Image (cartoon, helix red, strand yellow):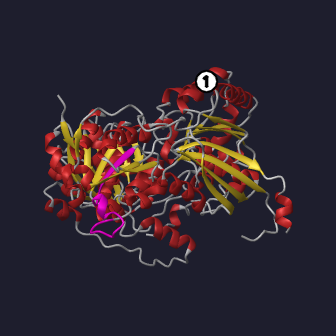
Amino acid sequence: MSASSLSPSAHTVAVLLDDALVTLNRAFGVLRRRNVPIEGLALHPSGTTGVSRLTFVLKADAATADRVAQQFHKMIGVRSVMVLANEDSTTEAKR
Amino acid sequence: MSEMLSGAEILCRALVDAGGEVIFGYPGGAIMPVYHALPDHPQLRHILVRHEQAAAHAADGYARASGRVGVCVATSGPGATNLVTGLAAAHMDNSPVVAITGQVSRPMIGRDAFQETDIIGITLPITKQNYQVQDVTELADVVADAIAVALSGRPGPVLIDVPKDVQNQKIEYRAPRARARGQSRPLTPGASPGSLEDGVRKAARLIAGADRPLLMVGHGVILAEAYAEVQALAEKTGIPVITTLLGISGFPDGHPLHLGMPGMHGEVHVNRAIQHADVIIGIGLRFDDRVTGNTASFAPQARIIHIDLDRAEIGKNVPVAVGIVGDARDVTRRLVAAVEPRRCERWLEHIRGFVRPRTEAFRGDLSPETILASIYEASHGECTIVTDVGQHQMWVAKLYRYERPNTHITSGGLGAMGFAVPAAMGVHLARPNGTVWAISGDGGFQMNMAEMATMVQEGLPVKMAVFNNGYLGMVRQWQQFFHEKRYSCTPIWSPDYVKLAEAYGIPGYRVKQASELADVVGRVNAEAGPALVEFVIEQEANVYPMIPPGGSLSEPIEAEPAAAAGH
């Protein structure tokens, strides 16, 4: 994804969710449907049995990141959602 | 002593244990074990539809009218895919539907087996949750969980896909564990009591300082049964009330504070009120684009207080000054306690100045008003009306006088033509002692008119009204306004509805003049079984006023004066 002229900042969203393919599929559906620009994506065990940690970086402003987080928040199988602003995202965007 | 049950028997028993009484369905290969078990569970009345889409709409209608889950059943493959429109409608309008689909046996899944479809993948975006049962030991818990998920928080449809070999697996039965499958958090995030109190306080302050406040009532008020609370809020403050398409019958139409429906086909004075308001209190609505028009010019002077159960709705479509996450009934009750009594007489007078007299003329004087008035009179205003999608839907929404809570049921969000006839069957089963009218256009009626056979076979006395103008009227109206009157593919032929009714063995009538209305509609309403009446209406009548899609609420297209309507 190319850096747009608006250079929206990047946000990291960390989601704890049920370790089930159908839940992951639903999670990706939330991103796909809203055409959220994703820069990076990682899935790891959370340390708790049956729970995974899905982390993704999206190139979008805080309001968009928050809207995405709200959609995750109400998904069945999602345990928690956290949004972090990436401090160095401006530098990233200029490169 | 232990009792060995098959998966299919467990499924039926779990539905019975959850209080299930009616299921709408259609048998087929991959769901046959369930159909084999059904006769042993006479508590479950099965309604054999003529198309699975009707099963989903009927379950939706049942759910909306009863507040309980509506259950529909289909086989794998085409049976399951036929449910999709109904599930999408239930999803958009927050209706607690549980769909049960057969699936090919587990060893065949993923091998393009006969009638195999990835119904889980297909329905992911239109269900609140879905499950493919991988082992019979999970089944009872899944059913209990699915029902709880469908009903809890913001309701919605849930799908359970059960492979045929799981239906045949036998195990020792045990009752489902309550909330057995791990949900470590509330299904709908609630605000903490602190922020709720804070929100209510801020809202009360905004209301106290407002000169031109408005209440906008959506489906959430009906889902939460917040009727008394909303009325108390309106009456304590004198604030005029607007009901959205799905909020209709959430507040009595005849109440002096009721203004009407907003949005694309809202009356001019309702939309003007929105554009002049300085505070809008929105309860249980999502500020849908059909309500707001262009959001950039929506309610330009208003600070918005938005009360919704779903946190994701707050600020999603319009910016809000105060967002309160919570149940419409609970929050409104708190708001009633927090606001100071006041009146809005000058504001109401101001709004009354916006009211326009209706000017359209109709062939045979058969106007939507007179037709709907005759249904109101015949049923003494006590029936439930289920509408389809299109011009008649807007006429009913604007012109029928709803006085009783939750008596207007329609496919609002999805706008699924073909909804009314099957959904009305579900409404009848939820309210067997009341009268239900299914009102459709000639287009939508022909989509699901095969369900007349279901009504006859199952004894469902739905009263069907067809507004026949020989066109797909709403599309034709758009063609007239926005596509140079090129009526491409919108003229639609109809069968002889009176003969059609006769073919199904039910009474059928045709009305062409207003003078025939009272007699015919009265007879249809009084029929013990299903009955049909066709209203032959003006061919090119329009629904006025109209905000062009994406346009501002301030710039409606209005009816020409009656003299120029052309006859």
Q: Position of residue B315 (x, y in %)?
A: 67, 46
The residue closer to the viewer here, A79 or B223, is: A79
The residue closer to the viewer here, B13 or B310, is: B13
Does B179 sit left or right of B169 as displayed? Answer: right
The residue closer to the viewer here, B399 or B426, is: B426
The residue under label 1 is B334
Does B215 sit left or right of B424 as displayed? Answer: right
Q: Position of residue B5 (x, y in %)?
A: 20, 40
Q: Position of residue B516 (x, y in %)?
A: 27, 53
Say if residue B17 shows up in the picture: yes
Q: Which residues are magenta?
A: B97-116
Secondary structure category for the residue under label 1: helix
**Residue B382 covered by magenta stretch:** no
Q: Residue at x 49, y 37 (%)?
A: B183
Does B6 sit left or right of B276 as displayed? Answer: left
Say if residue B536 shows up in the picture: no
The chain that hosts pointer 1 is B
The residue closer to the viewer here, B280 or B85, is: B85
Q: Position of residue A16 (x, y in %)?
A: 60, 45
Q: Establish if B186 lies above or below B476.
A: above
User: In the picture, which quadrant includes the N terminus of chain B?
Assistant: top left
Instruction: Name the kind of residue labelled 1 in the image.
Output: Arg
User: In the picture, which quadrant includes the C terminus of chain B?
Assistant: bottom left
Does A52 sit left or right of B148 as displayed? Answer: right
Callout 1: 10 Å neighbours few (<14), some, many (20+)?
some
Q: Residue at x 53, y 27 (%)?
A: B229
**Residue B114 covered by magenta stretch:** yes
